[in-house]
Image (spheres, rainbow, N blue to C red):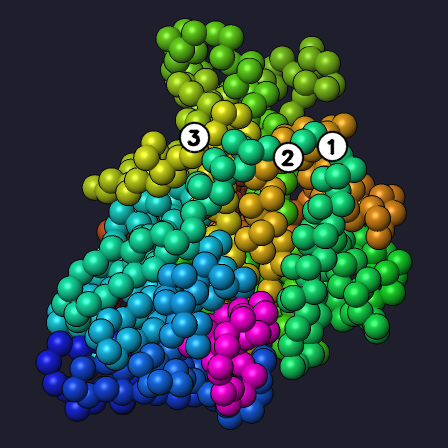
Amino acid sequence: MCGIAGLWASGPRRDLAAVALQMGNAMIHRGPDDHGEWIDLGAGIALSHRRLSIVDLSPEGHQPMRSASGRYKIVFNGEIYNYEELRAALPGQRWRGHSDTEVMLAAFEHWGVEASVKRFVGMFAFALWDSRDRVLYLCRDRLGIKPLYYGWRDRTFMFGSELKALCAHPEFAPEIDRNSVALLMRHNYIPHPYSIYVDVQKLPPGTILKVTGAQTRSEPWAYWTARAAAEQGQRNPFPDDPAAAIERLDHLLREAVRLRMLADVPIGAFLSGGVDSSTVVALMQSMSGRPVRTFSIGFNEEEFNEAHHARAVAEYLGTRHTELYVSPEEALSIVPELPRYYDEPFADSSQIPTCLVSQLARKSVTVSLSGDGGDELFAGYPRYGLTRSIWSGINCVPLRPRRAVSRALGMLSPAMWEVIYRSFSPLLPRKYRTKRPGEQIQRLADLLSVGSQEDLYKSVLSHWQAPGQLVPGTAEYPTVLTDGERKADLRDPVHRMMFADQVSYLPDDILTKVDRASMACSLEARVPILDHRVVEFAWTLPLSLCVRQGKEKWLLRQVLYKYVPSRLIERPKMGFGVPIGKWMRGPLRGWCEDLLSPSRIREDGIFDVDMVTRAWREHVTGKRNWHYHLWDVLMFQSWLEYQRISRAPGERGALAL
């Protein structure tokens, strides 16, 4: 696990080495163990690497690394888990060390770039310079586990694992893309290929970008797509045979976990006590000759605390478990650091416990396995069934009458509905009483107006339902939720929802959250459930094996129950959250009021002042729970403040709104 950066300058420049070093050093947290730069002054190419040593700790693993013939130079972030298998398949090589990077270079010389990448099993983002053909390749792994940004500025092409690297280039003049801010307000993250900056993109998962000149703009092409995996899997379904499916998934997951346990440094795992992380830890322990190191975070707020569940699983499996109960003050101390960790605005509040558990694990290990991916692959989110149920209910009524009812419900404010509700609530059966009637009626009005199940799911996923009103003058870029060309041809609407999450929410929220939180403290996080062979198998499964007997992730649960009794796992899904709404009314209130002050919002000119002020007032008084929406705004405002502090106004590189 490392940080990579580089540039291709048009025309001669003498400061290539200094600029490359500066870009790499901006990500020293991703690679504190070593650094290196490689320069070709004649071509104008510079590659920079920060190393976190995991495999082959010797100098033979140093990067940038050249191929045996000298044709290729590479900077690489990630792990190729099947490198020993690839090494055995490459004849006539004289190996200098035993790193996966050296095997990658030999593969490129033997099979070519795209053919080699298709053989790789792992997580990776790399830049490869072909000195013979004078071509620069950028590549990202299939699921988007490792990040890679790129863009053009004036006569220079530049790239990096994080935006920090691009911002460190002296010619980089960052300009906020307001359309991306609108996307952030809907999703709580910025979906690829977009970024917070104009003319800077995220390389999409499963793609290769071929750059043939510093000023030549090109588009990435896909060597693997989730869409093809989903459509092919559904065209060739696995039989509805539970026993055979359990055996097959168990085999695939064991192999995925085994490969990700290979390291020359201490290794452990995050453990929440839920299905996904417990499955990973159970498989690790079954293949380990000694107790596996496991880590969990606990909170005193019971509705957010899973630590005792994790402890029970750890005790049953016999792991060497470490847990840390965190006070609100300790958790909140992370908040000011979030803009530095996530150098693009990012507003999934579970980033807080993810940072905390990463810091806990890093005290003992350098690599930690994570259970991410189970929900997207095996229909684990309750919102899938909820969306289908809601659509079945409202679709019985034609769209025009539904929209008329929606408009009628919207004529009264949530506060007025609460007044009406209080008048009639004593007459209602107890099961129909609610704490936030106005908020729920407003949500019902939103849902009644949708015209399709896809639009309903978009509404369910959206934080701000009308980001264009919140961020005036913007038009949201097309995404998998809005662009029919990006959607997969899948018959079942639940599969379509799963696909949307797998290509957007998974790489741009879940995996981004884990990557930045873990790398901020120089910890490598590995995600065995997202081995692409597991993903491809999951798409062959009929939904009856994913949701069965009223249980989401049924098949994954059956694999887990071969190792852990169901009584330790079966409970309502909690998620990995914190009481952010409560904290915003309490210990975070002053911080919130400063960032959300009308004068500040008006001066920045990004958000509609009235919408933000009204939401904050209703949230702090308890009239409505706006914490998801406001956290999006707060994370942008906090990020904006950090960017201003870290850049001198008036100088080149100052932030442009």
Question: Is residue 123 shown above or below 22?
Answer: above
Give the residue number, with chain letter if any, for mark 2.
Answer: 238
Which residue lies under the disc numbered 1? 241
Local crowd at mark 1 within 10 Å, few (<14), some, or many (≥20)? few
- Image depth: mark 3 or mark 2 in front: 2
Q: Residue at x 61, y 15 (%)?
A: 423
The three-letter amino acid code for the residue at tag 2 is Phe
SS class, disc 1 = loop
> As shown in the figure, which amino acid type bears the numbered disc 3?
Asp
Distance from Cα at disc 1 to Cα at disc 2: 8 Å
Whether residue 319 is visible here, answered yes or no, is: yes
Which residue is most to the left? 11
- Classify 332 as above or below 629: below
What x and y, as percent, mark residue 41? 19, 88
Range drawn in magenta? 77-105
Of residues 501 and 631, the one drawn nearer to the viewer in this rendering: 501
Q: Nearer the viewer, residue 334 or 371?
A: 371
- Give above or below for 99 relative to 583: below
Q: Is there any visible trace of residue 436 in the rendered image?
A: no
Whichever of callouts 1 and 3 sits on the residue coming sooner in the sequence is: 1
Q: Assess whether mark 2 and mark 1 are in contact (beta carbons under 8 angstroms).
A: yes
Q: Residue furthest front?
A: 92
Q: Secondary structure at mark 2?
A: loop
The three-letter amino acid code for the residue at tag 1 is Asp
Q: Which mark is residue 489?
A: 3
Residue 87 within the magenta-colored segment of the rendering: yes
Mark 3–mark 2 contact, CB under 8 Å? no
Does residue 33 appear to the left or right of 451 in the view shown? right
